[in-house]
Amino acid sequence: ERGEKGCLTDLIELFGTDPDLAFSFAVSANNPQAGAVQLSQTCALLTGLCSCVADLNDRSLSEKALSVLLKFHQPEYMAKWVVGDSRDTVLEISSAVHVTLATVLMESKPRPWDLHVLDILVEIVSRGNDYLRTLNKSYSTFTTLRIQAHACLEKAIILQFCDLEPEKVAKAGTLLSLLLDTVDILGEWKNVMSPFVANYHIYRKLGPLDLLARTQQHRAIRATMRQLCHRTQGSFSAWL
């Protein structure tokens, strides 16, 4: 008997072979609750894959889950997350993924694993931005989950800024830049409903960190953090 983990591995491999199967929702598009059902199912699917990615005790499962998770963040599959092209639903699902991965990053123990999770977040946020650019522009609402995602990612990034490894600090800077790009794409830089967005112009002053030495990186980060004009849950939690 392969057991529960064996069945889970088989299911992930099946989704990798036929991604459309994962989004063959057993709900009629004419059902007024179809969108809500699909949103819930897609959130559960993608966050479940994130949990599998974080399984350090089974590297084979982790690698297969990561492959499928990244595949599901390709534009042709993001378009199938829910019925229609609503930016709000895409942002809601993405926020659930971001919260899960940011939590994994903050709780991870092996130091090399931190950089791996950062790479995953950078790739996923980058692909999400590419897809958002293809959707019709419309006003996007700040839900509790979106604000939570901002706080979790901000905290995770600031914690990585405190690291002694320049590569990790630079990667965290890249992730921050991508999150600010999302704000640009959505045209939300004047929206203060999210405390993170309220500090948009300050964070934008922090340039690329990959070409700087460790001392220069930390000097630039400290200078930026001192200018933050809005106290955020993410920045406050990171310093506790």
Image (cartoon, rainbow, N blue to C red):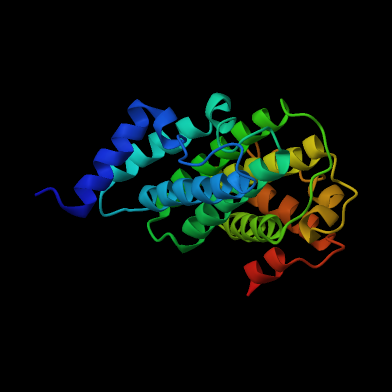
40 vs 149, left or right, is: left
Of residue 219 and residue 67, the one placed in the foreground of this image is: 67
| Residue 173 percent coordinates (x, y) | 65, 45
| Residue 9 percent coordinates (x, y) | 26, 43
Residue at (52, 49) in percent of width and height: 43
Q: In the rendered image, which quarter is residue 34 located in? A: top right
| Residue 84 percent coordinates (x, y) | 66, 33
Residue at (81, 62) in percent of width and height: 226
- The reply to whether residue 60 is visible in this rendering is no
24 lies above or below 234 = above
- The reply to whether residue 33 is visible in this rendering is yes
69 vs 63, left or right, is: right
188 vs 216, left or right, is: right
Of residue 11 and residue 228, the one placed in the foreground of this image is: 11
181 lies above or below 215 = above
* The C terminus, quarter of image: bottom right
Q: In the rendered image, which quarter is residue 12 located in? A: top left
Residue at (57, 53) in percent of width and height: 96
| Residue 21 percent coordinates (x, y) | 40, 32
Among all residues in the image, which is located at the extreme right? 190
Among all residues in the image, which is located at the extreme left? 1
Q: In the rendered image, which quarter is residue 148 located in? A: bottom right
Q: How many marks?
A: 0
Of residue 21 and residue 64, the one placed in the foreground of this image is: 21
Residue at (68, 64) in percent of width and height: 234
189 lies above or below 192 = above
